[in-house]
Amino acid sequence: MDNEQASQTAIFMRSKRAIVLTGSETEEEAKQALSQVVIIPRPPKFNNVHEQRVHMKQRLAAGFRLLAKYGWDEGVAGHATFRDPEYPDLFWVNPFGMYFGHIKASDLVLVDHEGSIVRGNRFVNKAAFVIHGSIHTARSDVVCAVHTHSMYGKTFSTFGRPLLPISQDACAFYDDHSVYDQFGGLVFDSEEGKRLVNALGPKNKALILQNHGLVTTGSSIESAFWFFVAMERCCQSQLLAEAAAVNGYRDLCVIPDETARRTWDTVGTQKAGYGQFMPMFDMIAQEQPDCLL
């Protein structure tokens, strides 16, 4: 998060008013408090690529734990990947058939874009390779991609249409997601992977797979997972709103384009996604610290 974004979303300037909190600090302590720098959360800097890789594997594992905590696992379906920081033509992915709630950083498997295992002793979901390999090949800006068969995402996908900007949260996806309006069964065909990427487009961060589920991408692991959480909840919100309305989506109050676009500037950016994920990471890392092993 930079100063410009912080100024849009939080108060971060230190007041020049000098006060003493009676009973808890001396005048000297009050002066020291006035000189403290306000900390703005930022992505970490790494001393070497090994340190960065370990960090990223831990974040991906924590993301899987979150998916499991929210009930967004479905048997052996679902996968998330990140591009290796040293070898951008390789990506890390979850082992096939391993429960999201048990995944540790050390369990992740490294594969190449030809579908061969480079590191790890577990095999990989072929659909994960086809979908994510296609995305990582076509979109150099995508560091991480997330896909599961979450309940509201796959339910909303049956409409074959995009989300509407009916809430502040939904504006995060305004003019930033698309729909793949075909379903050809399990994604085992490389040509199907290419069609998915074409539907995602050169800039969108999310894709609704008709009759299937959601895919979100990010320039960081944190943003990709946050936008999956946010999109799933926006699908739930719109389903509830349409079910409550007499005339379905026709009765919904849609946010005007200009306002939705301006709201996206605050809640829809990759930096915003990173910041939104961090409280969730802190929660899961404290609850399930073994995910970092």
Image (cartoon, rainbow, N blue to C red):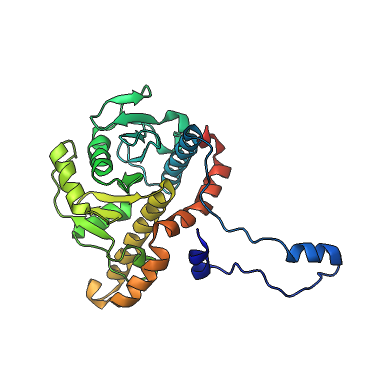
Residue at 42 percent of width and 67 percent of height: 266
Q: Is residue 74 left or right of residue 266?
A: left
Q: Nearer the viewer, residue 204 or 99?
A: 204
Q: Residue furthest front?
A: 47
Q: Is residue 245 left or right of residue 285?
A: left
Q: Position of residue 276 (x, y in %)?
A: 47, 57
Q: Quadrant of residue 166?
A: bottom left
Residue at 44 percent of width and 57 percent of height: 271
Residue 210 seen in the current view = no
Residue at 54 percent of width and 34 percent of height: 290
Residue 8 seen in the current view = yes
Q: Nearer the viewer, residue 4 or 153?
A: 4
Q: How many marks?
A: 0
Q: Nearer the viewer, residue 241 or 57?
A: 57
Q: Quadrant of residue 14?
A: bottom right
Q: Quadrant of residue 13?
A: bottom right
Q: Position of residue 159 (x, y in %)?
A: 20, 60
Q: Is residue 185 left or right of residue 234?
A: left
Q: Position of residue 171 (x, y in %)?
A: 35, 67
Q: Position of residue 77 (x, y in %)?
A: 29, 39
